[in-house]
Amino acid sequence: MDFLALFLIYSGVVLSAMALLCLCAGRGDSFLTAGSQALSFVIPAQLQRVAQRVFHRLFHTRSCLFVVLHVVLQAAVYVEYTWEVFVYCWELQFHLLILLLPYLLLAGNVGCFILCSRANPGIITKSNHASLVKIYAYDGVLFQKGIVCPTCDLEKPARSKHCSFCSVCVHRFDHHCVWVNNCIGASNAKYFFLYLFTLTAMAATTAVISAAFLIQVVLLSGMMHGSYIDDQGQEHAVDILFVIQHLFLTFPRIVFMLGFVILLTLVLGAYSCFNLYLALTNQTSNEWYKSRRHRCCHHPTLQPRDRQAVYRNIYSKGVWRNLMEIFKPPAVLESKKKT
């Protein structure tokens, strides 16, 4: 097993955690606290303090580290695809357009990544505050009128949240994505939506092409119609396990990459479906999480006057209008007042 194979295994573990980090966005405090409490019994106190500083730097401040990691891992996959899969598939006369599809998706993904990371997510300032307050009504449960952000010294418009990473309040706040090093809000939600789906499509197409190549190799070799002799000298018909072992020994890096992109496709595919659900119902990740927490805190045994208000999504306007709100958010007017 060579270094690149080991690196791809590590890459698979790290990138598979990518969607989990996104799913835990807005909930990092409780997630990391629970993890630190569990590890505090086996890790020395001095090492714990160092780890806490590192985690604080990674998960509570803006950093380009995950952006660099994202680029490096993506480059590693495409180098392996180009060096191994593309060359072999070209020799087997795969259609050129099919082989180029991952590169076309990569170009679109990079474009969405740049737009998402560099775009203003919808930062609330004194000049646009009055305009933003009028866009969404307060539901009286998740968002209540009169709540002032102590850091920005501004009344929070409905569906907004203060981001501790960026130290700003963001309109229609979804979450802070460490992989693009930016908040996801009203103004760049469409770019994140496209970025996520192109990333999923990249992993899926790479997996399909790699699997098609390996299947083609097996079919051309006629291996499935053969037999093999085991260590005890007994003859057996070739089965799936033998084929996998043979492919692993013959094309180890391709098999590792295939397992990696399949796992990545499943994880990112699930997260993409979750984001599609949020878009179709006009919810953000922040609102979805807060609504679940609100329902968990609801106590039906209390008297009617003591019960918490029942949460109801008042922002959904139908599937088409919900999607249009993502890709064409309401215009925000800037006042002449300086920020």
Image (cartoon, rainbow, N blue to C red):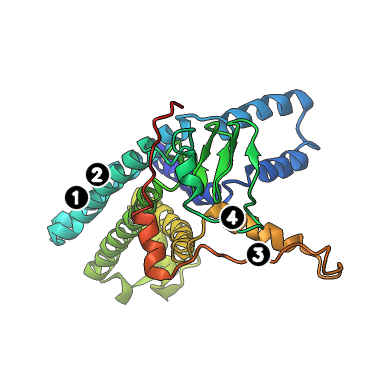
- What's the residue at 38%, 62% (across, down)? 323
Q: Amino acid at mark 3?
A: Tyr
Query: Which label lies toward us, 3 or 4?
Result: 4
Residue under the image location 47 percent in, 52 percent down: 135
Between 290 and 337, the one lying in front of the other is 337
Q: Quadrant of residue 90?
A: bottom left
**Residues at circles 3 and 1 in contact by the CB criterion of under 8 Å:** no
Check contact, mark 1 vs mark 2: CB within 8 A.
yes
Q: Is residue 10 visible?
A: no
* Sooner in the amino-acid sequence: mark 1 or mark 4: 1
Residue that badge 3 annotates: 311
Check the picture and name the quadrant holding the N terminus.
top left
* Drawn side of residue 216 relative to residue 48, left or right: left
**Sequence-earlier tag: 3 or 4:** 4
Helix, strand or loop for disc 4: loop
For disc 4, the marked residue is 138
Give the labeled residue for mark 2: 83
* Image location (x, y in percent) of residue 21: 54, 46
**As drawn, 226 above or below 258:** below
**Do the numbered discs 3 and 4 sit on residues whose CB atoms are within 8 Å?**
no
Q: Report helix, strand or loop for mark 2.
A: helix
- Could you tell whether 2 is left or right of 79 in the image? right
Q: State the separation of the CA atoms marked 3 and 1.
A: 56 Å
* Distance from the alpha carbon under mark 2 to that under mark 3: 53 Å
Q: Position of residue 9 (x, y in %)?
A: 46, 46
